[in-house]
Structures are given as C-alpha cells and as structure tokens.
Image (tube, helix red, strand yellow):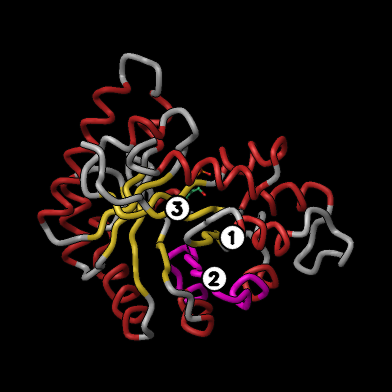
Amino acid sequence: MTPSRPLLLGVNIDHAATLRQARYRGAHPSPHAEPDVVAFTREALAGGADGITLHLREDRRHIQDADVHAIAALPGVRLNLEMACTPAMNAFARKLKPAAVCLVPESREEVTTEGGLDVAGQLARVKETTHVLKAAGIEVSLFIGPDAHQIEAAVAVGAPVIELHTGAFANAWKSPAAAAELERLRAGCELAHRLGLIVNAGHGINYDNIRAILTLPHLHELNIGHSIVARALFTGIRGAVAEMKGRLKPSA
Ligand code: PXP
C-alpha cells in the first residue's frame, strides 16, 4: 500500500562529521576543518529535508557538542537528537530542548537481537528518561526492532513514537531473506499503529530499497543518513536530499 501523503524525511548528517573527524579530531575542531557540517546541514535543508537527525555519541566519534549547538540554532530546523539513555545525555537534551529525541542503544547490554534498544529489558530506566524528556516538551522516540515485545514495551514506558530498525531488512535486501524481514516490519508497523504509536523507520535505507520500504503501512518519517551522504559526494547534499525526497512522493 502506497501512502497517500509523502513521508517526512529526516536527514542524518552523522557521516559528514565522520568524514571531518577522519582528519580533524577533537571536540573543538579547527575552524578550517572540512567538511563544514553546519554548511552541509544548511544545504540539506535547502534540498528539502523535513528534519535533521544527529547522534551525539558518548564517545563523540563523529558529531561534537559544538555541532549540535550550531545546528540547533539554524533557523527553521527541526532537530531530532539521537542519544543513549544515560543521565549525562538526559541532562544535555533537557538543556538543548530539541524537537525530538530518539533513544538508541550504545552499549552492548542495551541492544536486542534486532539491534534496537532493549526497552523491555530496562523498562524502569527508559520510562524515567521518557517521562523527564516529555516533561521538558521534547517528543520521545525509541529505536527498536520490529518485535511485538519491544513495541508493547514502548507503549508501557509512555513513548509516543517509535523508530523501527530497518537494518535487518536492509542487510537482507536482494537476498531470499528480504521478504520475511519486510513482513516483520509490516507486522511491526501495524501493531504499533494499532497501539496508538507514531511509526518512523530508519537504518540502511537507500535509493533502491526505499521502494520496498514505501510499501509499509502507517509510516510517518524515515531517517536516512549513509546513502544520502554517500550520494552527496557525487551530487552535493542538496541534490542528494532532493532526489530522496522525490522518491518519497506517492506517485514516484
Ligand atoms: N536511525 C537511527 C536511530 C540510527 O541510529 C541511524 C544510524 O545512525 C539511522 C537512522 C540512519 O541509518 P543510515 O545511516 O544507515 O541511513
């Protein structure tokens, strides 16, 4: 079923920062460091990004604190901050007040077999973080696998939004296992929608497998990073985002 309205596109810019960090390390990179991640973000917005997603990792592997603050200050940006469920990141988010926070796993103990956040295995912790962030006016999303147990746990902790992990499907794309992974995502979308959750999706989505992702019901937003940033090396980020936006249109 093709959705009747275009999905929103959140552009994950982490890999622009990965490229910068490959040469310029440290929390305060030189003003000459390339690429300029803020200028890159402006261009992504000019290409039609509905939101900007970035992951401030505890190890500061790619995005730095200064990037988050500079991007949050861009006019009209809808920021989705991916972060670990830790007291330090919780405090950071409450101060920053992005439009949305997506809680993602960073340590091995927090990861389910799907690779998503193990919400069911740490209900109290995720519930407390969700509550505190919601009280600060931030929309909270949980990055989870398409597993009924985890979707029900997302409802139990009071999260209004989930982002279904599409990595297993993306890894299986063009193999015999892809159809089953897509059906698992479809069942996850249907269950989450029935339970009143807003359903986003992301990880490993590209210009090709997006065709299959678009057959999933009830999707609200896709978060796509690597494939768009990779294409930007050839086309520029504005064109790469515009092309992906074109693929999200119902008639495309
Ligand atoms: N959504 C979440 C929660 C992620 O952690 C990532 C990867 O940073 C993405 C979406 C984007 O994945 P990709 O870079 O493979 O498009």
Q: Which residue is mark 3?
A: 9
Q: Is residue 34 above or below residue 129?
A: above
Q: Secondary structure at mark 1?
A: helix
Q: Nearer the viewer, residue 76 or 100?
A: 76
Q: Which residue is mark 2?
A: 77
Quarter of the view holding residue 243: top right
Do the residues bearing badges 3 and 1 touch, measured as CB atoms within 8 Å? no
Residue type highlighted by circle 2: Val
Q: Residue at x 46, y 76 (%)?
A: 90
Do the residues bearing badges 2 and 1 touch, measured as CB atoms within 8 Å? yes
Label 1 neighbourhood size at 10 Å, few (<14), some (14-19), many (20+)?
Answer: many
- Is residue 117 visible in the rendered structure shown here? no
Label 2 neighbourhood size at 10 Å, few (<14), some (14-19), many (20+)?
Answer: some
Locate residue 10 relative to residue 70 in the image: left or right: left
Q: Position of residue 143 (x, y in %)?
A: 36, 54
Q: Secondary structure at mark 2?
A: loop
Quarter of the view holding residue 59: bottom right
Q: Nearer the viewer, residue 162 or 241?
A: 241
Q: Which residue is mark 1?
A: 45
